[in-house]
Image (cartoon, grey):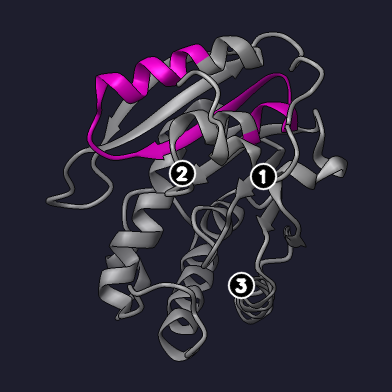
Amino acid sequence: MKASLAIGRHDLTPGQLEQLELVLRMLDADEHAPTAVREPARAANIHLNDSLSALELETVRRARRVADLGSGAGFPGIALAVALPDAEVSLIESQRRRCEFLQRVCAFAKVENARVIWTRAEEWREGSSANDVVVARALGPAPVVLEYAAPLLRLGGSLVDWRGMRGQQEEDAATRAAAELGLRQVEVRRVEPYAGARDHHLHVYLKTRATPAGFPRRAGMARKRPIGS
């Protein structure tokens, strides 16, 4: 497999494409990779191209501090770290084994601008009000993601939340949660990260005012009692 053919369309350098191919190799070779999609040709689309679709957004392209919440197997965070070498990307993951996998991938692919942080999003005090962009992919219901992200964004920063088919009820709940957290939705962009992809959307929120005191709530509360619901 040639990464330049599998990854496509993002004006990446040969060196960046080589790094992404190494990421795919690690997914395929490491039996502890925390994903069911490991075969390189599929993973190039399902993981890498889907992650890199965020480069369509100017707010992502110009970001210098990015936090990936619930990084899992490293997407979108590792892919964006490769594509944005001048950015510092924090991979936030609460499970130790996944953190160990992320460390191995970053070392193998020489992704030096990504750091793995073993913590829950609600407990990452170092990241409070510090990030230009927070990204989340397949992390949870929209109000939950909003509560995790809002305290970590600087004023004027953006949340980019990967979502599938749109649903009015969930979007209404997200709008209510955003208003309570100091965020405002500015765009829902439909993307087609690879041929045949359907119902892929990037929900983009802008932080317009400080997150109120009391957020984030203690670990687990965002899921147990989502705001805006």
Describe the element under mark 2 as helix, strand or loop: loop
Circle 1 sits on which residue? 67
For label 2, count other residues whose C-alpha is less than 10 Å away and answer few (under 14), some (14-19) or many (20+): some
Circle 3 sits on which residue? 98
Q: Give me the residue at 61% from left, 54% from top.
A: 81
Q: Does residue 171 appear left or right of residue 97 in this picture?
A: left
Whole-percent x and y of residue 126?
Answer: 87, 43
Q: Which residues are magenta?
A: 148-176
Whole-percent x and y of residue 155?
Answer: 74, 16
Amino acid on which the number 2 mark rests in the picture? Gly
Amino acid on which the number 1 mark rests in the picture? Ala
Find the residue positioned furthest to the front: 224
Is 153 within the magenta? yes
Whole-percent x and y of residue 21?
Answer: 44, 75
Pick the quarter of the image with the C terminus: top left
Circle 2 sits on which residue? 140
Q: Indicate the quadrant where residue 56 lies.
A: top left
Q: Give me the residue at 50% from left, 18% from top.
A: 228
Amino acid on which the number 3 mark rests in the picture? Arg
| Placement of 204 over or under 119, stated as above or below | above
| Placement of 24 over or under 191, stated as above or below | below
| Placement of 43 over or under 93, stated as above or below | below
Pick the quarter of the image with the N terminus: bottom left
Q: Earlier in the sequence, mark 3 or mark 1?
A: 1
| Placement of 58 over or under 197, stated as above or below | above
